[in-house]
Image (cartoon, rainbow, N blue to C red):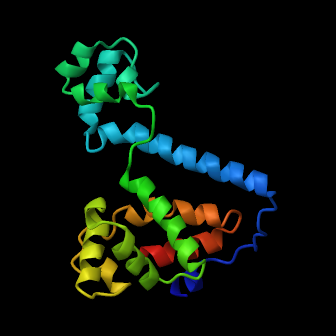
Amino acid sequence: EGIRAQRPKRPTLSPADMSDASRRTHIAGAWMGRCVGCLLGKPIEGVRTPKLWALLDRAGSREIPDYLWRLPNLRDEDYQALDFANLLKWRNTDHMPEDDDTNYTVTGMALVKAKGIGFSPADMADFWMAHLPISHTCTAERVAYRNFVNNIEPPHSAMVRNPYREWIGAQIRADFFGYVAIGRPELAAELAWRDAS
């Protein structure tokens, strides 16, 4: 309510008027985009910019024109010389491997199926502990999970001794709430807020 009270006045939005087929197409496109983005980023997660620039320079490019494991003008030896040999294993990827980011989208969907759109932050915490192994969490989520185990309830579980609390975990987890609330950004934001709590 405090967040709502601080926002400026704006016109009321009407929900998107879509057929079920159109809604499914939009959600499938959003999910595909999420998976492609994760697949593009997964091999270079944690790689610092100067190292990436060296790879692009070797390829003769100033932007990423394709998957990094198939850059034009590069041979296996180039990848190895620049300490990117791990990229070569991605060449034969034929699926989206498990990823913490996509796991959270599926977790959000499973929670809404189990608890409905009225789920609470405590419902999310209970759901994580019942269905999401702690080893599948990272940074802010792992600290929050540890806090759940130590009986620190939401919203304090997100903040207590959590140096990652201002990172992007809640943003990463928000995808499904946009899918379930197409055309209703206020509802999507509320659902994402309950998850973030």
| Residue at screen point 54% across, 65% down | 109
Q: Residue at x 64, y 73 (%)?
A: 186
Residue 144: x, y in percent? 30, 75
**In the foreground, 155 or 26:** 26
Residue 24 percent across, percent down from the top left: 70, 53
> Which of the two residues, 192 or 180, is positioned nearer the viewer here?
180
Q: Residue at x 33, y 23 (%)?
A: 56
Q: Is residue 196 above or below residue 123?
A: above
Decide: is 159 above or below 19: below
* The C terminus - image quarter: bottom left
Q: Quadrant of the N terminus?
A: bottom right
Q: Is residue 84 visible in this depiction of the protein?
A: no
Left or right of 44? Residue 66 is: right
Q: Is residue 177 above or below residue 154?
A: above
Residue 153: x %, y % from top left? 34, 87
- Decide if residue 53 is on the left or right side of residue 122: left
Residue 54 visible within the image: yes
For image coordinates 29% across by 74% down, the residue present is 145
Is 138 situated left or right of 114 in this image? Answer: left
Q: In the rendered picture of this protein, how many numbered marks are placed on residues?
A: 0
